[in-house]
Amino acid sequence: MSIAVVQETLTIEHRVLVPPGISGTVTAVSPEGEYRVEDTIAVVSGEQGETRLSLFHRWPVRKGRPYRSKALPNSLLITGQRVIDTLFPIAKGGSVAVPGGFGTGKTILQHALAKWCDAQVIIFIGCGERGNEMTDVLTEFPRIVDPRTGRPLMERTIMIANTSNMPVAAREASIYTGITMAEYYRDMGYHVAVMADSTSRWAEALRELSGRMEELPADEGFPSYLPTRLAEFYERAGMVETLGGREGSVSVIGSVSPPGGDFSEPVTQHSRRFVRGLWVLDRQLANARHYPAVSWLESYSEYVEDLGQWWESKGFPEWKSLRGEIMGLLQQENRLQQVVKLVGPDVLPDSQRIVLETCALFKNAFLQQDSFSPVDMFCPLEKQVKMLKLILLFHERGRRAIQKGATLVAVRGLTICRELMRMRQTVKNDEIEKLDRMAAELDRSMNELEARYERR
Amino acid sequence: MRKEYLTVENIVGPLMLVQEVSGVSFAEIAEIILPDGGIRHGQVLEINEDKALVQVFEGTSGLTPGEVRVKFLGKGLQLGLSRDIVGRMFNGFGRVIDGGPPIIPEKYSDVNGVPINPEARDYPNEFIQTGISTIDVLNTLVRGQKLPIFSGSGLPHSRLAAQIARQAKVLKTGEQFAVVFAAMGITFEEAQFFMNEFEKTGALERAVLFINLANDPPIERIAVPRMALTAAEYLAYELGMHILVILTDMTNYCEALREISAARKEVPSRRGYPGYLYTDLSMIYERAGRIKGKSGSITQMPILTMPEDDKTHPIPDLTGYITEGQILLSRMLHNEGIYPPVDVLPSLSRLKDKGIGKGKTREDHAGVMNQLYAAYAKGKAAKEIAVVLGESALTPLDIMYVKFSEQFEKEFIGQGEGENRDIIASLTIGWKLLGMLPATELKRVKQEFIDEYYPSKQL
């Protein structure tokens, strides 16, 4: 229950909560006005006697805050990142782990999510990471304008800074501090997203403390209770009905930094057991400067099934089938690439090379996203779906043209194809209808091409 | 008068257990007085009831329990600082070893430093021109960054570091760096190389050197980077100088850490390194940066040799997780005679995006960088196919890429040791090489820059 509201920032209304476990009748209420945080603003008398309520209350961070009931996550957490929203979506109240070796772009991805995801409150836990990255957020976020509210992003962001050279005991606690804050805002009825960067550093802090206490080590020196602790953390995510009857959610995105990029290490392995989505960052993609380097072959999201209806309700009923189609093509491309590695691309017939061509287009024009370009850094759902449709249309028409005798070189040579390559940069978010024109142009060029070959 | 304890119970490796002590604090420095009047130093590592475990910096050989006296000094490891440290040479314990007079300190600072609150930091975004194309264009270094060189034994990392120390400057101001140089467990010759280099270029007068050679006690090695960074922090944040810290070789430092950890009977983590290796390294690397309201800065360039050139070895791996990128040297390029043999694809500078572009370098910088990367990666991939199937299996476009990547290695990566290319010269070479590819292939560069810089075929 909330008893008062305070405008915390222009974006966030702080709803002052009655601490869980307190019940009874309100016997006194202070009038509206300005108060200090410790001032008593209401008195409740009930079974536990008389309780004075102030603007804050304390909560042990290691204990999850209670709620009335948990629901299954069924609405998308919009991130504006194409590879995530379209291919591997996360639901509000969901949990995802992001494993990746150093230099694969974990932090950039976390920052992009913190900037653009449509949660109302963002808790960013910098857990044992670089000091300059924290500074980056601190200097950049006040300047970036939240597209939904028109206010600086910092007004909805809480940062917990524990840089790598700060005490390990604090690092161990920082994760809990963050998730407790998230639950607190959830109880006010907000959708909260927690970014933990990185859970590996937290696990290492656990290991270090455990070592100092001379406990028996399990895998790689980590304490045997590591999986239990990880589970406790990720399970605090969820879509709930709060004690006050509101709807709120906590979504958790935890990055994992496996030593040597080796995903068989304990933190990655155990995290996988407790999350429903995995965005694997691939070293090879990062080396080729394909960002975000989310591997389309190894990543997965179990939320795809739950979210089909949500997309439908937003006017994109085709999303799930489009996604299935492109995933199928990517699988096919992977097999073909193995052949190409052995014998070269020349031996493949054009009907198969068009698959390679489509996937190359998809990777360049769709999967890659420039988090520093003002046009490309956030991609609305409508643009995502239209871009994907356009790419699949290219595939369909290209395949047909080749069947009718056109060569791949001719298909590739069309001016419209070059435009498709650049569409993520050239089509601004407020001129999405340009994509419709491009689709019409693609149809027209292909018709022309087909006609040319049919005449022969 | 401080108490002197005669109660040394036993000595194991570099560690000494002193009994019946009182009033001793953690990490306090102790003096160990030998029967012949000689003095060694140690630090308290552990206190258990009335027992203190002391780690002896100069080694414990020749010490006999019952004969040595131990005096606790009531303070942690400190370094005496003054303006005069510039141009001087110290050992790992902070003593002058160049034969000159001792330093008269203006202040003493704890060598462990304190973590900087991210709020107090200023974000590094000033481009540093090193005069090396692969760094300036592809892996831009900025002031306040920590950018390590991952190398292997036998590769020219020392020459590269010396070249950077010699050429580094900030574009507009033309300010040079003062250098703090910390040598950890390197050979006499390697240390001598750096000293000669600094002397030749006159950098020695602007350098502070901390030298711990391969045959010096490993325990002392642990203190070297901390001493060096304490000196750097003093020069940068109190005297407002721009400092380039070169730490070589971090692998030796970590080996020393492992040695001591084993002596302390700690539970080992990967490959016998202590579980706190990450934390320990971060306490060194994080001491780089800029602070709001202070004019000075600390830029760090640690060098480490990867055992067996293995990037997944704990030392390079954990380093990579802390530092803001890495410059990787390639044995293959070195064997082909290309200097500096920077392995472009896995190298990375995380802070580059904030330090390049219009007003800092040139507006087309980001596009050129991404395009060179992509084209080189494509060329290398095509080359691999050619190795298996012969060049005939390649499409004409692929052959263009292969030629590009070969030329790229020769002209762009390769440059002379004395060659100081400015950023415009490096970008020009980049465009010249991109000219080998059709303009339609340049998907990562904006059209307007292609129109302006793409070399036309007539040239």
Image (cartoon, rainbow, N blue to C red):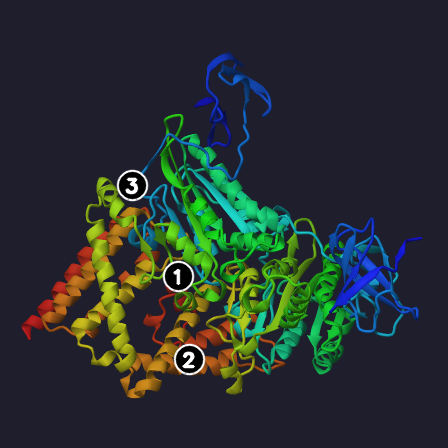
Q: Secondary structure at mark 2?
A: helix
What residue sits 60% from the left and 72% below the top?
B304
Q: Secondary structure at mark 1?
A: loop
The residue type indicated by label 3 comes to Asn
For the residues bearing labels 1 and 3, Cβ distance under 8 angstroms: no
Residue A23 x %, y %? 46, 19
Instruction: Point out the tag, 1 or 3, that comes first from the N-terminus.
Output: 3
Residue A74, label in figure: 3
Residues behind callouts 2 and 3 on a single chain: no
The residue nearer to you, when weighing B125 against B36, is: B36
Residue B386 x %, y %? 33, 84
Residue B405, label in figure: 2
Q: Which residue is mark 1?
A: A293
Answer with left or right where residue A44 lies relative to residue B83. Answer: left
In the image, residue A220 sits, relative to residue A239, either above or below, namely below
Q: Quadrant of residue A327?
A: bottom left
**Few, some or many C-alpha atoms within 10 Å of disc 2 (few <14, some 14-19, many ≥20)?**
many
What residue sits 56% from the left and 69% below the top?
B271
Residue A132 appears in the figure: no
Residues behind callouts 1 and 2 on a single chain: no
The residue type indicated by label 2 comes to Ser
What residue sits 42% from the left and 63% below the top?
A264
Q: Secondary structure at mark 3?
A: loop
Answer with left or right where residue A70 lies relative to residue B109. Answer: left
Host chain of mark 2: B
Q: CA distance from mark 1 to mark 2?
A: 23 Å
Host chain of mark 1: A
Q: Nearer the viewer, mark 2 or mark 3?
A: 3
Q: CA distance from mark 2 to mark 3?
A: 49 Å
Q: CA distance from mark 1 to mark 3?
A: 26 Å
In the image, residue B437 sits, relative to residue A37, either above or below, namely below
